[in-house]
């Protein structure tokens, strides 16, 4: 099989390549087209991995002909180009034109509704597209499916993600993922599902404190823009069970949370609106990215070894066999040597799992969110192969 990865030399793309080429693969991969605008990063990754199946493709996604050529003939196109750069629909349509299965990492729900609206076009063309297939969204959607499958009637499902860092405090701010994504999560309003309908909620609203086991402890969660709440409550097997509430809430490590709140208060939440400095127009995001990158390089020796812990969980309430029932499904990702080469093992490993399951099973043409495409019974064993710990309680 031939896999095209756009933005393949970035943090997430590189992680997907690592997992695809590992001994955990469940499909036969003939070639991975590693497509990126940075030749230097592509060559560094290819040299490190030393696998002859990697083919380097210099690609500027604004070049329509080059984009089409990079996708054509592949069995799947994995879009890892950052969502907020604005090329999501262009790449999505290019995959349809090439009749190649499509997958992206979603995030924030910026284009999710527009993409799902094209379901019938993809179905008619015999092309499969799965949106938001990383960890959150992605794995989180499958967690919600596992919760929903335990209930005959659903009142609510509440979805949470918490990250915490164990070890000496880092004097340097190291973003957990794209700076633009973090700022959007803190500065933009979000769409949640309350009272049986989608409603807009203010940035950093819905504050909720939950007591979690160490190393998380007492965590403050808040609403943030994501795609799960746009799709999960409308999915077959969930919508028809009467769901009236679905929310997605986030908790970043305590001290880092304070830093992001401060940056939003300082005005960096409006990161794309240009400002003028000395007669030159610049975007706040470009300035902030450069400052953070410089600070990380300058103070690399001061960055302590920290262990990252993640917990992803959904709590569903409703009825089973006519009796009140609460279901909790959680996935815990704790430090492990397996994750050492990855910047974000959870996202990139889940994207690899999703791509492989799409290719391994008979494809279903159309546009889908993960909870409507994957079954927990086939998805969760792949998580366990990667040392993610899954638990389910029904009470």
Image (cartoon, rainbow, N blue to C red):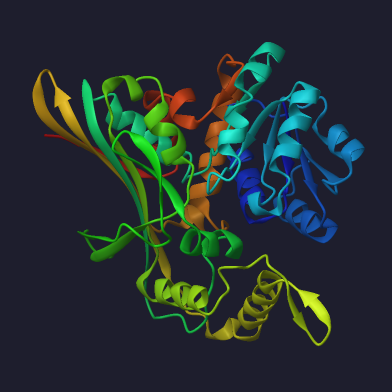
Furthest-right residue in this view: 65
Q: Which residue lies at the image location 21% right of the left edge and 58% below the top edge?
A: 210
Q: Which residue lies at the image location 35% right of the left edge and 72% below the top edge?
A: 254
Q: How many numbered marks does the figure carry?
A: 0
Q: Which residue lies at the image location 75% right of the left edge and 29% below the top edge?
A: 95
Q: Quadrant of residue 213?
A: bottom left
The quadrant the N terminus occupies is top right
345 is higher (above) or lower (below) than 236: below
Residue 184 shows in this picture: yes
130 is higher (above) or lower (below) than 41: above
The image shows residue 78 at horizontal and vertical percentages of 67, 37
Residue 151 shows in this picture: no
Q: Is residue 290 left or right of residue 387?
A: right
The image shows residue 305 at horizontal and vertical percentages of 46, 74
Q: Is residue 67 left or right of residue 383?
A: right
Q: Is residue 74 left or right of residue 284?
A: right
The image shows residue 139 at horizontal and vertical percentages of 44, 39
Closer to us: 153 or 331? 153
280 is higher (above) or lower (below) than 95: below
Q: Quadrant of residue 23?
A: top right
The quadrant the C terminus occupies is top left
Closer to us: 119 or 196? 196
The image shows residue 115 at horizontal and vertical percentages of 62, 32
């Amino acid at each position: 099989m031939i896999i095209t990865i756009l933005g393949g030399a970035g943090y997430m793309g590189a992680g997907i390549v690592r997992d695809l080429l590992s001994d955990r693969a469940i499909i036969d991969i003939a070639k991975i087209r590693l497509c990126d605008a940075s030749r230097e990063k592509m060559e560094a990754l290819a040299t490190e991995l030393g696998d002859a199946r990697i083919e380097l493709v210099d690609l500027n996604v604004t070049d329509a002909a080059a984009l089409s050529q990079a996708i054509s003939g592949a069995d799947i196109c994995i879009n890892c180009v950052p969502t907020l750069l604005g090329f999501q629909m262009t790449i999505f349509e290019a995959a349809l034109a090439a009749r190649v299965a499509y997958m992206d990492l979603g995030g924030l729900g910026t284009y999710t509704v527009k993409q799902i609206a094209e379901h019938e076009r993809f179905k008619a063309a015999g092309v499969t597209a799965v949106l938001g297939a990383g960890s959150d969204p992605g794995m989180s959607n499958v967690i919600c499916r596992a919760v929903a499958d335990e209930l005959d009637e659903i009142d609510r499902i509440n979805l949470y993600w918490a990250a915490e860092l164990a070890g000496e405090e880092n004097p340097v701010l190291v973003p957990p993922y794209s700076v633009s994504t973090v700022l959007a999560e803190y500065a933009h309003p979000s769409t949640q599902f309350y009272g049986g309908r989608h409603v807009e909620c203010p940035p950093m609203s819905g504050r909720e404190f939950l007591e979690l086991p160490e190393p998380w402890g007492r965590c403050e969660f808040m609403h943030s823009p994501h795609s799960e709440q746009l799709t999960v409550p409308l999915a077959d097997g969930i919508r028809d069970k009467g769901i009236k509430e679905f929310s997605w809430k986030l908790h970043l490590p305590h001290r880092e949370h304070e830093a992001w709140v401060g940056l939003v208060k300082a005005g960096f939440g409006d990161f794309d609106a240009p400002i003028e400095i000395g007669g030159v127009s610049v975007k706040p995001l470009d300035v902030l990215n450069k400052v953070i990158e410089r600070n990380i390089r300058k103070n690399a020796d001061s960055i302590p070894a920290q262990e990252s812990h993640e917990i992803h969980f959904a709590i569903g309430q409703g009825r089973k066999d006519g009796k009140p029932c609460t279901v909790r499904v959680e996935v815990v990702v704790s430090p492990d040597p397996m994750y050492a080469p990855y910047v974000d093992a959870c996202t990139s490993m889940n994207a690899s799992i999703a791509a492989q399951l799409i290719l391994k099973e008979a494809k279903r043409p159309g546009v889908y969110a993960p909870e409507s495409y994957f079954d927990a019974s086939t998805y969760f064993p792949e998580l366990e192969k990667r040392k993610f710990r899954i638990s389910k309680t029904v009470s």
